[in-house]
Amino acid sequence: MQYQLIRSNRKSIAISFERDGNFKKNRVRETGTASETESLTLEDEGLTLEEESLGQPGYEGLHLVVKAPYWMSPGEIASFVASKREWILATAKRLEREQRKAMAGRPRLENGDTLDYLGEKRTLSVIREERSRARVKCVMDRLLLWVPYEADYEYKRAQLEKWYRREALQIFTQKAEEYALILQVGFHEIHIKDQKSRWGSCSGRKNLNFNWRLIMAPEPVCDYVIIHELCHLRFMDHSADFWKLVESICPQHEQYRRWLRDHSGSLYVI
Ligand SMILES: [Zn+2]
């Protein structure tokens, strides 16, 4: 079985599916919310092992990544991967299925198509005007998109993404500030990114990064990811103390993690 091996000073071995082109040089310094989509802890030969999968269907290829501590021997790593063969195959199949489903339901960005915004449906109205400068406005349950006559799918998609990113920055910043007060933590900056395999991350420099697509998810799910990343400012790991802190602010976090695992495809339709 082919996989990419990433060594770090982590404590346990983890397997995940990641999308191509998603490798960062500084990933060791970062903690991500990638494991929110699927994560289970297994006891195996006295080691605490953790498996994670992203569950996010994308348009790029998925590949298997194995993250292992420096001290683990190649033989131990290989036998761990072999012992998880069934899980790997089942997960790969599920991800492929989700990807196909997401592609089939992909809106063409024409009048009457619906798009999600904080978990609610917005009906798209495309208004074509001569020499129009593109703009997007949300009015009640309608999403109005002004575009020039010649605008194609990609043009419309880019405008909508820009709008989603602006909304995400504004709403996530406001939420992060509120929760940071409750948690008594301080962060530096918030960046909205197109993270291929993460909903959020927190850097060593106390910057919070969020995937712009998250703004399509229901509001409590957004809140959960924001709380999760803020809690990393206190605990840079997924220890019991970390989860206790998450739970103190977000008692239903399990439900939101499940939502992200089961519905990630719906956030990748445009
Ligand atoms: Zn985390």
Image (cartoon, rainbow, N blue to C red):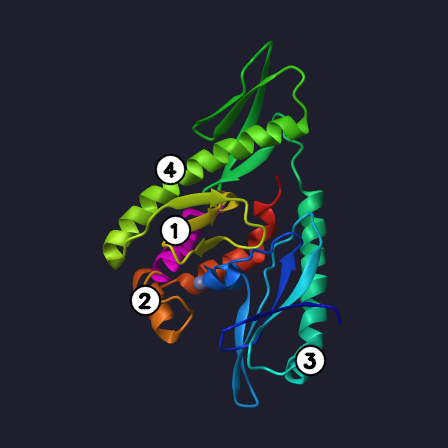
Question: Which residue position holds label 3?
Answer: 78
Callout 2: few (<14), some (14-19), or many (20+) C-alpha neighbours within 10 Å?
Answer: some
Amino acid type at circle 3 is Ala
Q: Is residue 228 visible?
A: yes
Q: Which residues are magenta?
A: 217-232
Residue 227 point in image, percent of width and height: 36, 56
Q: Whole-percent x and y of residue 144?
A: 51, 24
| For discs 4 and 3, the disc positioned in front in the rendered view | 3
Q: Residue at x 46, y 43 (%)?
A: 192
Q: Which residue is mark 4?
A: 170
Res 245 label:
2
Q: Earlier in the sequence, mark 4 or mark 3?
A: 3
**Disc 1 designates what residue?**
207
The Cα–Cα distance between marks 4 and 1, rounded to whole angstroms, is: 16 Å
Distance Cα–Cα, label 3 vs label 2:
35 Å
Displayed quadrant of residue 81: bottom right
State the image quarter where residue 67 is shown: bottom right
Note whether ligand 1 is within 8 Å of mark 4: no
**Dot 1: element:** loop
Q: Left or right: 133 with respect to 242?
A: right
Asked if residue 226 lies in the magenta stretch, the reply is yes
- In the rendered structure, the answer to whether residue 166 lies left or right of residue 126 reads left
Q: Residues within 10 Å of mark 4 (few under 14, many from 20)?
A: few
Q: At 71% across and 54% down in the image, what residue appears?
A: 61
Q: In what quadrant of the picture does the N terminus appear?
A: bottom right
Task: Check whether the beta carbons of the residues at disc 2 and disc 1 lie within 8 A of each other.
Answer: no
Note whether ligand 1 is within 8 Å of mark 2.
no
In this rendering, the answer to whether 184 lies above or below 147 is below
Mark 1 is surrounded, within 10 Å at the Cα level, by few (under 14), some (14 to 19) or many (20 or more) other residues, namely: some
SS category of the residue bearing label 3: helix
Q: Check disc 1 and give the amino acid type.
A: Asn
